[in-house]
Image: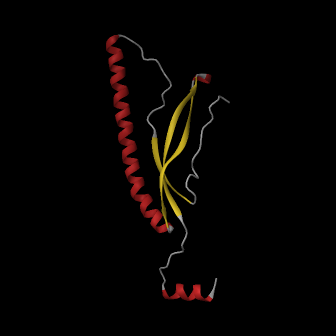
């Protein structure tokens, strides 16, 4: 490093290195692939939004706040989904019917990551059985 850089960091001990980071929100969207081998599922990871920050410390603070909220909301969505499925099963049972397995894997799930480039964690699952 340079003499000026060293001097700066001696005077300001808590200086942080600059480096752009992105706190990104993704949705993991599940899909039913097909009936082969008893049915198979896949998922896409889709970038929903992101925020650019100037250093890792700020990225981690934002991540921690958003992560806690995302986990809470995912649990709430899953509980709502399970309650709806339970109602459907009860209604079918009362009618004397069976429910068809349409291969629905559940509600989409959100997750948050810290990235160097927005969209690093985006992916698209295979759409054919292999």
Left or right, 36 with respect to 70, comes to right
Q: Tell me where residue 73 appears, x and y as whole percent.
A: 37, 45
Q: Which quadrant of the rendered structure holds the N terminus? A: bottom right
- Residue 36 located left or right of residue 72: right
Which residue is rendered at x = 62% and y = 23% of the image?
36
Image quadrant where residue 83 sits: top left
**In front of the other: 31 or 48:** 48
Q: Residue at position x 40%, y 49% from top?
A: 70
Judge whether 63 appears above or below 1 on screen.
above
* Relative depth, front residue between 51 and 35: 51
84 relative to 100, above or below: below
Left or right of residue 1, residue 101 in this image: left
Q: How many marks?
A: 0
In this view, 91 is above or below 14: above
Q: Find residue 10 and report its horizontal and vertical position in percent.
A: 52, 87
Q: Residue furthest top?
A: 96
Q: Nearer the viewer, residue 117 or 82?
A: 117
Q: Foreground residue, 109 or 25?
A: 25
Residue farthest along the right direction in this orientation: 130
Q: Position of residue 35 (x, y in %)?
A: 58, 22
The residue at 57%/47% (across/down) is: 122
């Amino acid at each position: 490093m340079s003499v000026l850089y060293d001097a700066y960091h001696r005077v300001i001990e808590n200086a942080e290195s600059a480096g752009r980071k992105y706190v990104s929100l993704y949705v993991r969207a599940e899909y039913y692939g097909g009936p082969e081998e008893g049915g198979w599922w896949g998922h896409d990871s889709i970038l929903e939004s992101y925020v650019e920050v100037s250093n890792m410390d700020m990225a981690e603070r934002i991540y921690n706040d958003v992560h806690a909220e995302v986990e809470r909301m995912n649990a709430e969505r899953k509980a709502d989904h399970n309650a709806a499925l339970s109602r459907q099963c009860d209604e079918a049972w009362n009618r004397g019917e069976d429910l068809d397995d349409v291969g629905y894997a559940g509600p989409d799930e959100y997750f948050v990551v810290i990235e160097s480039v927005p969209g690093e964690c985006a992916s698209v699952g295979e759409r054919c059985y292999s």
